[in-house]
Image: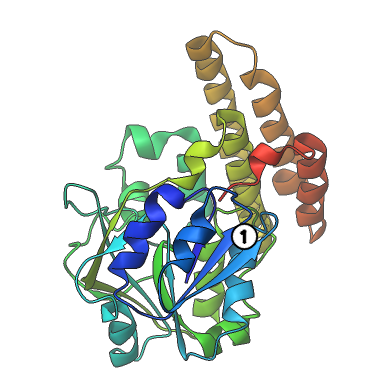
Amino acid sequence: MVVCYRSAGVLEKCLRSLGGMPVVVVDNGSGDGAVEIARRFLGVETIANTQNRGFAAAVNQAVAGRPEDYVMLVNPDVEIEGDARALARACRESGADIAGGQLKNENGSAQWGFSVRRFPTPATLAFEAMGWNRAFPWNPVNRAYRYLDRDPGHGGEVDQPAGAYLVFRRALWEKLGGFDEAFYPAWFEDVDFCLRARQAGAKIVYAPEAAARHLGGHSFRALDWETRQVRWYVSLMRYASKHFRPSGRRRLAAGLVAGAMVRLILSTCRRASLKPIPLYSEVIRLAYLTLWKGGGGSEVGMLDEVEQRKLGNDTRLHVL
């Protein structure tokens, strides 16, 4: 299945690479002709939502109506190489519940560090927020998080394959209650799904023989800079509130505050604008209230309230 928003420019290549497999395309109110493109392909079922329901909700919407034992998620900016059924076959033959394939750049090099990752820890996400993983990619935290200590050609069990090219058993999806639709419009919903699957005893594998070209970040390019920042931080804090212990949340909160302060200064200087000040001030406030001070399930509700107040009804945000 393919979930798309404003993806008409890449959707046709994606569908052609699927080689006539039964496909469900869920379009989240794009209005860009993606639905018409999908309907030209035999064997493609289309679901045309009138608004953006988010990635997780669109996946749940499509899977709920399918009888297949295995479901493959493919982003619209992914083009499968070779046999489109290779990943599902690898999942079935390995006895896995979830399998991810090898994603490649346009030049054929491996997108290692993205194709699979270990589950994030408070230190991992703090390093991400502070920019240390980008500035010093060979630091031990980043090496562990992005499996930089592993050969991209070596398959086997992993923590979390990217949701851009993923196969999972439908029975597992039912057991877990589907993807968590609170991660809206995206970010961390695939990490959350894999972590809950692992906690339920699922086997998760990486199958490098199932390869695909991945443009990367296609739909998010429609988001303005401020929106991208807010949405990413909100999803990150939602994940932390859901899965980290209080001590881990406090450590992450300290990292988020430190990182936000540095980014505030750098972004203000680089953009010669005061626009980053309210954005990162809100990130700092959220980190304090939901991660440092928060102590229960109220953190996620607070994120919902703040997100609605901060973002309002800006339709620019409704992008996958």
Q: What element carries label 1?
A: loop
Q: Can residue 48 be seen in this view?
A: yes
Disc 1: CA contacts within 10 A as few (<14), some (14-19) or many (>=20): some
Q: Quadrant of residue 298?
A: bottom right
Residue, disc 1: 244
Give the residue furthest to the top: 272
Residue 53, x across and y down, in percent: 67, 59
Name the colouring of the figure.
rainbow
Q: Quadrant of residue 54?
A: bottom right
Residue 180, x across and y down, in percent: 65, 67
Front-lying residue, 69 or 114: 69
Name which residue type carries label 1.
Phe
Position of 13 with respect to 162 (left or right) is left
Residue 52, x across and y down, in percent: 66, 54
Residue 301, x across and y down, in percent: 81, 55
Where 87 falls versus 148 (above or below)? below
Position of 225 with respect to 81 (left or right) is right
Front-lying residue, 15 or 189: 15
Which residue does the image show at 52% across and 62% down from the upper left? 3
Total numbered labels:
1
Front-lying residue, 2 or 216: 2
Which residue does the image show at 82% across and 38% down from the upper left? 309
Front-lying residue, 38 or 97: 38
Position of 220 with respect to 286 (left or right) is left
Position of 108 with respect to 56 (left or right) is left
Q: Can residue 115 be seen in this view?
A: no
Where 54 falls versus 237 (above or below)? below
